[in-house]
Image (cartoon, rainbow, N blue to C red):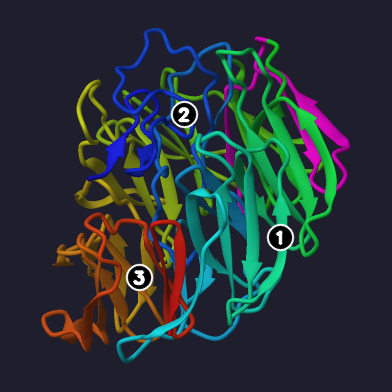
Amino acid sequence: MVVSCARCGAYLVPAQTACPRCGLPRDAAPPSPPQYGAPPPYAAPHPYAAPPPGWGAPTPRRRRTGLVVGGSLVAVALLAGAGAWVLLRDGGGGAEAYSYGTDVELPAPAEDEPEEAWTYTPDAATAVSAYPDDTTVDDGVLVRWNRGAEYDSPTSMVVLDADGEEGWSADFEQASFISSITEDTALAYSFADVGSGAPGVVEVVESGTGEPLWDTEGTFAGASEEVALMSEDDGEGAVEALDRETGEQLWTADDVLTVGFSAEGDFVLLGDDGVRRVDGRTGEERWRITPEGEQPGVVVAGEMVLLGSEDGTQALDLGDGETLWSDDSVTELVAAWTLRDGRVLGATAYSVTAGESGPDDRTGWVLDREGPVGDELTLPEGRDAPWSWEDGEELLAAGGVLYDEDLDVLTSEYVSVLPTTDGFYGVAQDGTVSYLEGLDTIASPEWSAPLTGDEDAAGTVTAVPDGLVLVEDGTVRCLR
């Protein structure tokens, strides 16, 4: 059973006794008012992965203190339990697809039931997760874990090659969550401890070696490929942009309440004085507008900036800030991702009731530059993986539900759907994985096997070239 944090909405895996984002105990009711600095909603998981626990926390209400980060990063991010990272893809063979708004290459499938190729078990580890990574090691698998019994203990990572042999590793001194990995740097962070008064921290190491580059105290507010953003926590909504490789200050901005990330590496900043797009490296303003609605949030998807509020959504052109449309039926939109056909999937946050054991379903919309397309979608609780790819027609998978190009449901029996160059995997709640060679095999998969033995398989299965990676009881298994 997937459980959401009653305060910030982050998913909690069974082993977590407290929220990896805000620290609220697993079964506690939310404090009022909130007593934590708002953590940023994370960008996309790895292209091969359905979203792991922790993805999709609701955007907190706008306020004068704290910074909220929304939208999608220039790279592909992933979050598992207590960590997240960005993996930049060099491409490779395979069909084109979009996962969490990012153009990716799909892996070839395991056409026959795969067999165990290797296993890896970190020592004294909690919150173990594993995902494909060929950013620094071809056909590699990145494994990360926390060194300690607490969710906020320091984190470690290792990149394994296709045979499970170690490529490079890093042990972060204080940071608990791995936020992003590029070809040059790996960035990890921890939020401030409101109980002890200890500040947050950011640590950056060199990709490929794990050698430390720089670190700083402060509140992490998100990162692009070249820039890390920090909240200055001065009560005025100030942010500081730092060079990812050197830690050098690039620019600062005041009156920032919410940030969106564009695919070009620019930032869209929302403050009391309006919405403005700024150059990611220089902070130079490209355009500025005044939102139509009250207290909007901001998210960037494709060529649109979406300002969502209780009263509806206003869509802006990313290039010049001009209003494309406004619609009062698209309410409380807090997340959006680009689809393969150029449209956008927008969604509300999960609704979490204090004391309840899990999230409600969330509402989704397919949007284009003219407005909403078709009817509202219901994204089932526990998963919200937006995949879009072409298999004779445009397909969309969200929340384990597979839709055709007219947004009609093709199948809804899975907790996640993982496309490949030929067909796709369907992952059932009990850990059974099925390989479907195409749409005509939905009723009769090529093979099905209970690969994990996990009664809650959401987020435990990801696809690698010609195989799968699974995490069970702290052990990573690669099947090919």
Can you identify the residue that label 2 sits on? 297
- Which one is closest to the eye, mark 1 or mark 3? 1
Question: What distance separates the C-alpha of mark 2 from that of mark 3?
Answer: 30 Å
Name the residue located 67 percent from the left edge and 71 percent from the top edge.
166
Horizontally, residue 453 falls left or right of residue 217, namely left
Figure label count: 3
Where in the figure is residue 303, as x and y percent of width and height? 53, 52
Lower position in the chain sequence, tag 1 or tag 3 = 1
Dot 1 alpha-carbon crowd within 10 angstroms: few under 14, some 14 to 19, many 20 or more: some
Q: Is residue 254 magenta?
A: yes
Please say if 441 is above or below 370: below
Q: Is residue 452 magenta?
A: no
Can you identify the residue that label 1 sits on? 169
Kindly tell me whether residue 388 is visible in this rendering: yes
Q: Nearer the viewer, residue 401 or 374?
A: 401
Question: What distance separates the C-alpha of mark 1 from that of mark 3?
Answer: 28 Å
Where in the figure is residue 94, as x and y percent of width and height? 50, 84
Please say if 304 is above or below 386: above
- Indicate the amino acid at tag 1: Ser
Lower position in the chain sequence, tag 2 or tag 3 = 2
Where in the figure is residue 319, as x and y percent of width and height? 62, 47
- Indicate the amino acid at tag 2: Gly
- Indicate the amino acid at tag 3: Leu
Indicate the secondary structure of the residue bearing disc 3.
Answer: strand
Please say if 377 is above or below 400: above
Where in the figure is residue 172, as x and y percent of width and height? 71, 44
Please say if 37 is above or below 224: above
The picture quadrant where one finds residue 210 is: bottom right
Can you identify the residue that label 3 sits on? 418
The answer to whether marks 2 and 3 mark residues whose Cβ atoms lie closer than 8 Å is: no
